[in-house]
């Protein structure tokens, strides 16, 4: 399979995480690829990426629906605001996870929690050497108290603008780690929130939609299967295919027990990664 030069959230954002050009004053040194046209992209990767990009907005909408439906915000469902990550791969995973936590906070109007996580995201991105890829103004707006702002759109823009900065092969791997981290954290939160209540059909469909992108995430990991850490993550994700299938194969009939089982499996992976 061809190697790629590509994208980022998840971000978190999760947005984590995830993408169009980031307007900086100075172009980064080295070749700058047009992600939409680069011949080095592997077959099918753009399609996978497009699906995951859409999933960011789906996740944000799910959290908003939960808030409007009376679900209680859970600080414990997220990573701690001061969470640190050692090593570049875990830092990239962490950026995606923090992005997802920010979306969750913003959807429930938890602006202080969102802001503290924004600070953590920028600090981790700085440690990884990619802070310039993120539009801090957009992220700050997402963490603001302005209820007129469509924060899911802002997060998507922040992740999209980060993509062109991640143009080297090494950074393409970072981008994929971020996507995985954001997706995993977003699904973890969704499972913790809905494992005892699937009465709202929009919530049920939102959880199902997140599970439905499971195969796309695995395919994205496969692009970098020569990276030992990415391969290890793919193996961990592949191991939860059974509980994932209970939900992804039946959008209308999966139960709270199915969600609880998947949430426990994801929690184990999450714990082993961070």
Image: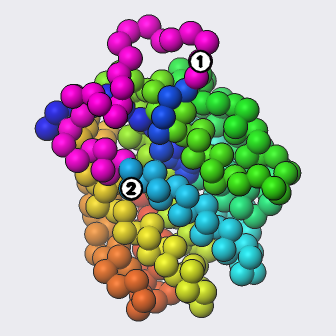
Residue 136: where, in percent of width, then height? Answer: 69, 31
Residue 231's image quarter? top left
Boundaries of the magenta span: 23-49
Please rate how many residues cluster around mark 2, counting C-alpha atoms within 10 Å: few if below 14, some from 14 to 19, many from 20: some
Q: Earlier in the sequence, mark 2 or mark 1?
A: 1
Query: Does the image show residue 80?
Result: no
Residue 147's image quarter? bottom right
The answer to whether 37 is drawn above or below residue 141 in the figure is: above
The answer to whether 269 is drawn above or below residue 130 in the figure is: below
Give the secondary structure at mark 1.
loop
In the rendered image, the quadrant that contains the N terminus is: top left
Q: How is the image coloured?
A: rainbow
Residue 106 in the figure: left or right of residue 172: right
Query: Would you say residue 172 sits in the magenta stretch?
Result: no
Q: Which residue is mark 2?
A: 51
Give the secondary structure at mark 2.
helix
Q: Which residue is mark 1?
A: 24
The kind of secondary structure the magenta stretch mainly shows is loop
Q: Nearer the viewer, residue 47 or 167?
A: 47
Residue 191: where, in percent of width, then height? Answer: 53, 72
Distance between the alpha carbons at the discs numbered 2 and 1: 27 Å
Please rate how many residues cluster around mark 1, counting C-alpha atoms within 10 Å: few if below 14, some from 14 to 19, many from 20: few
**Residue 134, label in figure:** none
Residue 63: where, in percent of width, then height? Answer: 64, 67
Residue 241 in the figure: left or right of residue 59: left
């Amino acid at each position: 399979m061809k190697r790629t030069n590509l994208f980022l959230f998840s971000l978190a954002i999760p947005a984590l995480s995830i993408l169009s050009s980031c307007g900086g004053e100075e172009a980064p040194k080295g070749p700058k690829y047009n992600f939409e046209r680069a011949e080095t992209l592997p077959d099918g990767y753009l399609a996978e990426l497009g699906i995951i990009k859409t999933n960011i907005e789906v996740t944000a909408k799910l959290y908003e629906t939960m808030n409007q439906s009376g679900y209680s915000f859970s600080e414990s469902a997220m990573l701690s605001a001061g969470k640190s990550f050692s090593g570049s791969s875990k830092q990239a995973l962490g950026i995606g996870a923090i992005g997802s936590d920010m979306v969750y906070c913003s959807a429930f109007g938890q602006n202080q929690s969102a802001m503290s996580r924004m600070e953590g995201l920028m600090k981790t991105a700085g440690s990884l050497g990619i802070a310039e890829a993120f539009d801090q103004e957009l992220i700050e707006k997402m963490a603001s108290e302005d209820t007129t702002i469509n924060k899911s759109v802002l997060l998507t823009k922040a992740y999209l603008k980060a993509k062109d900065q991640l143009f080297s092969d090494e950074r393409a791997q970072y981008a994929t780690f971020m996507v995985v981290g954001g997706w995993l954290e977003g699904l973890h939160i969704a499972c913790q929130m809905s494992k005892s209540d699937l009465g709202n059909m929009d919530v049920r469909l939102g959880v199902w939609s997140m599970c439905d992108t499971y195969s796309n995430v695995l395919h994205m990991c496969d692009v970098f299967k020569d990276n030992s850490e990415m391969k290890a993550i793919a193996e961990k994700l592949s191991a939860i295919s059974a509980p994932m299938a209970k939900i992804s194969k039946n959008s209308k009939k999966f139960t709270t027990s199915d969600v609880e089982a998947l949430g426990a499996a994801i929690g184990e992976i999450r714990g082993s990664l961070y």
